[in-house]
Image (tube, rainbow, N blue to C red):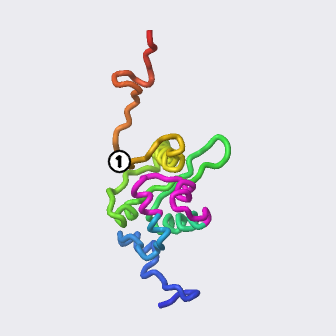
């Protein structure tokens, strides 16, 4: 049954799909599919990084991210900053991961430092992709690390980051 402006309505509202445990697949447009796929590859991306990766206008990407968030396919957090406003950091929910067939992500809302670190690694990838050839760097492949790897605070094997030894 057509909805307003001749658009087809989704079969079920997103909240009903979440209650039944089904991902709301009909809310996704090609831009939404692209954002979900990019989040599956990079794990955590900021809204600005998604704009750069998709090549679409910022408002278009933000609108689709809002739809994905309301549908329960992505989650987001805005980490605090001392000055200014931090961009939203997005990652897939269990529904989003199931939609593209990747491993279910672990909880991220409690680990703001981990969210920011993962987004920073994606920023490094983008910088090499965008500017690397000009300085002699070439990106050959990208592979995200498996979720849940233990963080080790070592700079050099056998030396702790909290008590580095000075050279003699």
Residue 156: quarter of image? top left
State the residue at coordinates (40%, 58%).
Answer: 40
Residue 145 x, y percent position in the rendering: 35, 46
Residue 48: in magenta span = yes
Viewer-closest of 29 and 141: 141
Residue 60: quarter of image? bottom right
Q: Is residue 115 visible?
A: no
Residue 139 against residue 67 in the figure, above or below: above
Residue 8: in magenta span = no
State the residue at coordinates (48%, 73%).
Answer: 29
Magenta: predominant secondary structure element?
Answer: helix
State the residue at coordinates (40%, 23%).
Answer: 160
Asked which secondary structure carries label 1, the reply is loop
Viewer-closest of 167 and 10: 167
Which residue position holds label 1?
147
Residue 109 x, y percent position in the rendering: 46, 50
Q: Residue furthest top?
A: 168
For residue 1, side relative to residue 80 (left or right): left
For residue 7, side relative to residue 99 (left or right): right
Near mark 1 (Cα within 10 A), the count class, few <14, some 14-19 or many ≥20, is few
Q: Residue furthest right?
A: 84
Residue 112 against residue 35 in the figure, above or below: above
Residue 130 x, y percent position in the rendering: 53, 50
Viewer-closest of 140 and 59: 140
Q: How many marks?
A: 1
Q: Give the quarter of the figure containing the C terminus.
A: top left
**What segment carries the magenta color?**
35-59
Q: Is residue 62 visible?
A: yes
């Amino acid at each position: 049954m057509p909805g307003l402006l001749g658009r087809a309505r989704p079969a079920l509202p997103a909240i009903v799909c979440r209650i039944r445990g089904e991902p709301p697949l009909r809310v996704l447009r090609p831009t939404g599919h692209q954002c979900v796929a990019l989040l599956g590859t990079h794990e955590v991306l900021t809204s600005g990084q998604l704009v750069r990766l998709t090549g679409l206008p910022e408002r278009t990407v933000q609108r689709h991210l809002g739809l994905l968030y309301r549908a329960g396919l992505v989650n987001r957090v805005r980490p605090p900053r001392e000055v200014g406003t931090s961009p939203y950091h997005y990652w897939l929910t269990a529904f989003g991961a199931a939609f593209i067939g990747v491993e279910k992500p672990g909880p991220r809302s409690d680990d703001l430092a981990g969210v920011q670190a993962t987004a920073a690694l994606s920023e490094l990838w983008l910088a090499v992709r965008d500017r690397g050839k000009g300085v002699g760097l070439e990106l050959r492949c990208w592979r995200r690390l498996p979720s849940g790897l233990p963080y080790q605070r070592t700079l050099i094997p056998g030396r702790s980051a909290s008590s580095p030894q000075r050279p003699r």
